[in-house]
Image: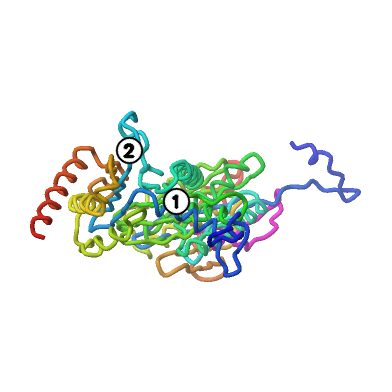
Amino acid sequence: MRDEKRKAIPAIGFYPQEEISTGTTLIAMEYNGGVVVGTDSRTSAGSFITSRATNKITPITENMVVCRSGSAADTQAIADIAKYHIDVYTMTENKPVTIYRSSQIFRQFLYNYREQLSASVLVAGWDAELGGQVYAIPIGGFVSRQRSTASGSGSTFVQGFLDSQWRPDLTLDECKAIVKQAVGLATFRDGSSGGVVRLAVIDKTGSKFELFRPDKPGFPFVQTPTPHLSFPPHIEQVL
Amino acid sequence: MSSIGTGYDLAASTFSPDGRIFQVEYAQKAVDNAGTMIAIRGKNGIVMVADKVISSKLYTDNANPRMFNVNDNVGVAVAGNYPDGFSLKNYAYGEAMKWLKDYREPMPVQNIANSVAEYIHIHTLGISRPFGAGAFFVAWNKQTGGRLFLVEPSGLNYEYKAWAVGKHRQAAKAEIEKLKIDELDVQQLVKEAARIIMAVRDENKDKNVQIEMGWVGEHTNGKYEEVPEEVVTAAEEWASAKLDEDDMED
């Protein structure tokens, strides 16, 4: 346990300080005309949920978003700085910066400051050269292009589901359904993910954002097998 | 102070009263008086040709090349003061390496030309002397086709279909304009370019000259390369035959 956590003295109003971070589920997948990304919306500081409706999909350009996970402060700062650089290059070079180069711009910061940062991102977007693209950059700054990927604490719960669902030439609707379902499955099992589901579709026409709340239609609820009752045998097994 | 400068030409840091920077204009003269160099964009590639004076027989073959790779895809040809041009090529190379390190992709030719132009331009602001050299930058790929830039000692940077610099640039440009360059493939360009360089030579003054060629195009798979010696020789032979034939008709 961390030092400062042990020294907490609630009686005098001193509480352990936890970094505000996005224990997260991020999903991104290519389809035949672009990419779909999906995220949960939980931001927590230790066990406390500081926000239940966070937007972890940050637009960088018309045709590119970045999905953030790790320290909320670090990833917000990196997204801001990278966006600034990309905007300047777009202006001085008079044409859009490719998604690949943008992912490398993100890499520069994530790699150069890897000792100080706790940040990992998915760069997703569409450009005329390569169409829909997803680049995963975990902590440390390794860049890899992915057809389908999950990231964040919830990712471990859905990696297999994504592997079983992805195939070449998915249509937009198929892809959206898979991504939404994956976020639903991950948030159900992962305690650090939850809240609403946010989707973004990026294609040649730009980015479209969607929101699915648990109290409105379209939310990906999960049905698990009803468990056996497990009272001790001498007690009647009814609720 | 006898000539045009009248005191305003001692440093690039001073404008003349009518708004000229003489030092930069003199630097341009270093290019204008250099051996002719032409670059032509054809149907499926670009060819650059330089006419070099070999000032001593004791030099090894190709001792002072004027054409280099900036990276695998981009070629540079420098005209004018040789050390200045060499330094520009080194700067361009350094920029391309930086780009490769930063973005993990080869630096595009336009960015190289712009960056070198900015560097040259800084040297026209009076900090030191301007560069006495100009540089062609060429590249070809399937998406953009051929691209050809010339950066001048003033920092001016234009994209061209074809261009000529050096001693006989006017005559060379006149010859290029007679060609339908958009329809010529690289093999034909090599021959025509050699012909033009040889045609514009001054038979009395230009002695001990040698042709250097570089190309990039579909046939090299977008890689900039030095043109092989046997291709250059063949082009020269074709060109002198063609020139002799033209002479007969006159």
Tell me the distance, in whole angstroms, between the alpha carbons under discs 1 and 2. Answer: 17 Å
Which amino acid type is shown beneath numbered disc 2? Ile
* Outermost residue, front side: B2
| Label 1 CA crowd tier, 10 Å (few <14, some 14–19, many 20+) | many
> Position of A49 compared to B129: left or right?
right
* Closer to the camera in the image, B119 or A234: B119
**Which residue is at a point 75% across and 37% down the rendered structure image?**
A2
Q: Pick the quarter of the image with the N terminus of chain B.
A: bottom right
In the picture, the disc for residue A188 is: none
Q: Pick the quarter of the image with the C terminus of chain B.
A: bottom left
Location of residue B94 with respect to B179 vertically, above or below: above
Query: Which structural element holds mark 1?
Result: helix
Q: Is residue B72 magenta?
A: no
Q: Earlier in the sequence, mark 1 or mark 2?
A: 1
Asked if one can make out residue A144 in the rendered structure from this viewpoint, the answer is no
Residue occupied by mark 2: B54
In the picture, the disc for residue B30 is: 1
Q: Which residues lie in the magenta part?
A: A38-60
Dot 2 falls on which chain?
Answer: B
Give coordinates of residue B89: x percent, y percent: 44, 44
Which amino acid type is shown beneath numbered disc 1? Ala
Give coordinates of residue B115: x percent, y percent: 50, 53
> Position of B52 compared to B27: left or right?
left
* Outermost residue, right side: A12
> Position of A101 compared to B61: left or right?
right
**Which residue is at a point 23% across and 37% down the rendered structure image?**
B229
Q: Is residue A51 magenta?
A: yes
* Closer to the camera in the image, A227 or A108: A108
